[in-house]
Amino acid sequence: MSITKDKILDLLTSEEQAPSTEYDSCISDVANRQVGSLISRLVAIDEEEEGGRTAITGFFYQMLIGIEYMIQMIQGNWDFVALELHDDIVVGKDKHIRFIQVKSSKYPHQKVSETGLYGRSSFKKDEEIFYYNDSWADKLLMKSRHFPVTSGYNCEFELATSYHLVDGSSKTDVSLYNEEFPVNIPDDDVLLNKMKSLSFDKNLSQYSYEDVCGESLQSLLTKFRIKKYSDSGNKIFDYMENIQSKFGALISENTRLSRADLHQLIAHLLDRCLIRNGKSMLYLTRQEAIEIKDEYKARIRASFGQEYRCHDSLEVIKNVFSEVHAECSVKHELYAEMKSELYRCHDALTTWIDEEPGDIEMLLSLYGHGTRRTLNLQPVERDKRLLTLIRGNVFLNIVNSSTTKIILGNKSLLLKAIGNKHISFLHVERRQTFDNGCEKLQTIIKSVSSEEQVSLMSKKPITIIDGHRDDIEVSKFVYIASPSIQLDKLGQDSDLVKPSIEFQAIPGKYVQKLYDDSLYDLDSLDEIRDAWKNAFVSIIGGSVTNV
């Protein structure tokens, strides 16, 4: 006889449960695949004044204990975890099997005598009162009949509670069973003597543990424990945080699941539930649990990776800006005026990193290739391009007497908005010319979506082309025919037959030379602003390139 999935699920569904409206709506949601609704109700608990003092908390308390055993399974302690969404959990490894019954209450303490720990229901026969073997402890220990010690099984039994069982007197003291499995049971043990009393099964046959389970009651009780996992009520959120930390530790030492991650994990597990004999069941193997853990590991690492990339990007920006500050600080009075402009430019870049969210690689990929796919550059080349880009941004800010921010979400060019116009930056590869840059611009724009092309057409953007080797001091108008644009996107009044996009390409090498010369030749920010404005206006002109 072996432990099989079908045997465990049949065992869980064969037990008769007392009616419980507390779980009805929760289990109905799972059965009807309305897990989203169930999770929404769990999230809503966070906002209630009474917190976990709601019926739904008991349901999730069982799920949290199930996840705790899932964590133990991932660590190698168990081969499977099975839940019947009422109060039963079963875990097993080889021939070691543990049955867990979950009991929760909104109260932090319960008197032993007022619980069903050993309390049995009665029936009358021939004017005499007899008792069924239906206490909580009975229901747990009776499960050993399916996996008897005589067949080599080692069964354990756990009553998992959200409250302390308190003793009114020595006659109800069950502290022997708290937390750990007792080594031996004395003959005068309270629980032993309560359960030794005459009891009957549902067929009204006298029940004997030794006859049915192949093991004495005293021996079975050495494998029984009462374990309090967490207080219910508001304290359930402390238990959630404990589970978040334990599951996170499976990923890395200092990792912790967020509350949203935990909700998603519960939803993931509930989505795996099977409906068997009208009951909602979950059966999870160790391999399946490891796969779930790996999914969260990848997701969290991706999130952390973005954080690390953002952090590294901010460090790179800080270092390159230090170089910009250094070259501007040659003239102290001028630097005092320009410092605030540099800080505004710095803030605009870091804001884009944070809000996109993006990183240096994405920024420079848009700048160099018109794509968001991150392309790695060697640190020296990376910092050189970033310095050129920052200088161009400082130039624009001062010319326009305002801080221009990078447009979020753009998938092709690195665009900045200035009033109702767009200015973009594009860097060519080493040894390429300004004309090569214009051709690169055309190639990029032809490949973007029609929606983006329409947007660009309405803005008539300017593109500063950086990194070219030739000395050019005039701009070029670049017209790009756009067959991908549908005329209806342009409006009914459009008389265009063959729509095109107009770009004005400005030589970045000229802008960089103007930037350098001004820092050394001029003494005030006003002089620099006037010089740069005049140069910017004069360069708007030039020849036309049609494609």
Image (tube, rainbow, N blue to C red):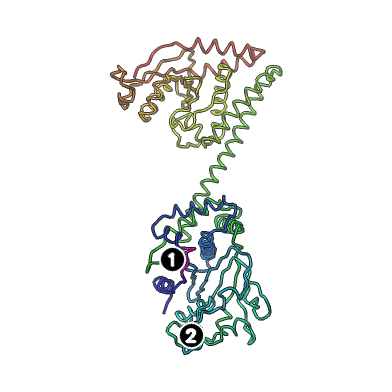
Q: Is residue 243 visible?
A: yes
> Left or right: where does residue 239 sit relative to residue 407?
right
Range of the magenta residues? 19-23
Report helix, strand or loop for mark 1. strand
Q: Magenta: predominant secondary structure element?
A: helix
Q: Residue at x 64, y 12 (%)?
A: 522
Q: Which mark is residue 16?
A: none
- Other-residue count near label 2 (Cα within 10 Å), few / some / many at <14 / 14–19 / ≥20: few
Hey, which residue is sitting farthest left in the picture? Answer: 497
Q: Is residue 20 magenta?
A: yes
- Three-letter residue code for mark 1: Tyr
Disc 1 to disc 2: CB gap under 8 Å = no
- Three-letter residue code for mark 2: Lys
Q: Residue at x 46, y 83 (%)?
A: 201
In the picture, the quarter occupied by the N terminus is bottom left
Q: Which residue is mark 1?
A: 283
Report helix, strand or loop for mark 2. strand
Q: Is residue 314 above or below residue 237?
A: above
Q: Which residue is mark 2?
A: 124
Q: Is residue 69 magenta?
A: no
Mark 1 and mark 2: Cα distance apart in space = 40 Å
x then y, percent, for residue 500 = 34, 20
Q: Nearer the viewer, mark 1 or mark 2?
A: 2
Q: Is residue 71 visible?
A: no
Q: Is residue 62 above or below residue 500?
A: below
Q: Nearer the viewer, residue 150 or 144?
A: 144
Mark found first going from the N terminus, 1 or 2 = 2
x then y, percent, for residue 124 = 48, 85
x then y, percent, for residue 88 = 49, 69
x then y, percent, for residue 258 = 56, 51
Q: Is residue 435 above or below residue 18?
A: above
